[in-house]
Image (spheres, rainbow, N blue to C red):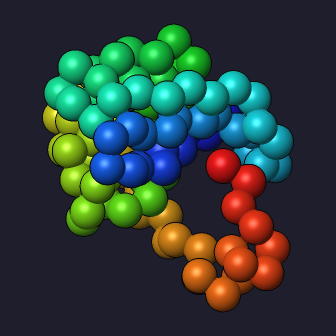
Amino acid sequence: MIGGIDSHKDTIHVAVITGLGVDVVDREFTTTQAGYHEAIDWLRTQDCLDVVGVEGTSSYGLGVTTALREAGARVIEVNRTRAAERQRKGKSD
């Protein structure tokens, strides 16, 4: 299982997928220290805290990235989808 986070101004969307990219479960948390710790605890219950992909590690994802690293997780930055591709295909989140 793989954990991933899509960061936004007010919330972070946390998902767990299989190694083949199949959605397993997801939840949303607030972009606060308490929300980050809730998300980390939830990822632990999903056995997905070793490596976590985060979209936007230097913008809205900075806070959760910092919290994940402090919790011992390895964080991998996930590239955002290009705007033209999103418009053509749509977003799934």
Q: Position of residue 70 (x, y in %)?
A: 17, 34
Write down the quadrant of residue 84 in the picture: bottom right
Q: Residue at x 28, y 36 (%)?
A: 31
Q: Residue at x 49, y 64 (%)?
A: 78
Q: Position of residue 2 (x, y in %)?
A: 61, 39
Q: Position of residue 87 (x, y in %)?
A: 71, 78
- 62 vs 48: above or below: below
Count every numbered label the image shows and give the total.
0
- 28 vs 44: above or below: below
Q: Position of residue 19 (x, y in %)?
A: 74, 45
Q: Residue at x 34, y 17 (%)?
A: 38
Q: Residue at x 40, y 50 (%)?
A: 7
- 20 vs 86: above or below: above
| Towards the viewer: 86 or 62 | 86
Write down the quadrant of residue 76 in the picture: bottom left
- 46 vs 7: above or below: above
* Position of residue 71 in the picture relative to residue 43 (left or right): left
The reply to whether residue 17 is in sight is: yes
* Position of residue 7 in the picture relative to residue 13 (left or right): left
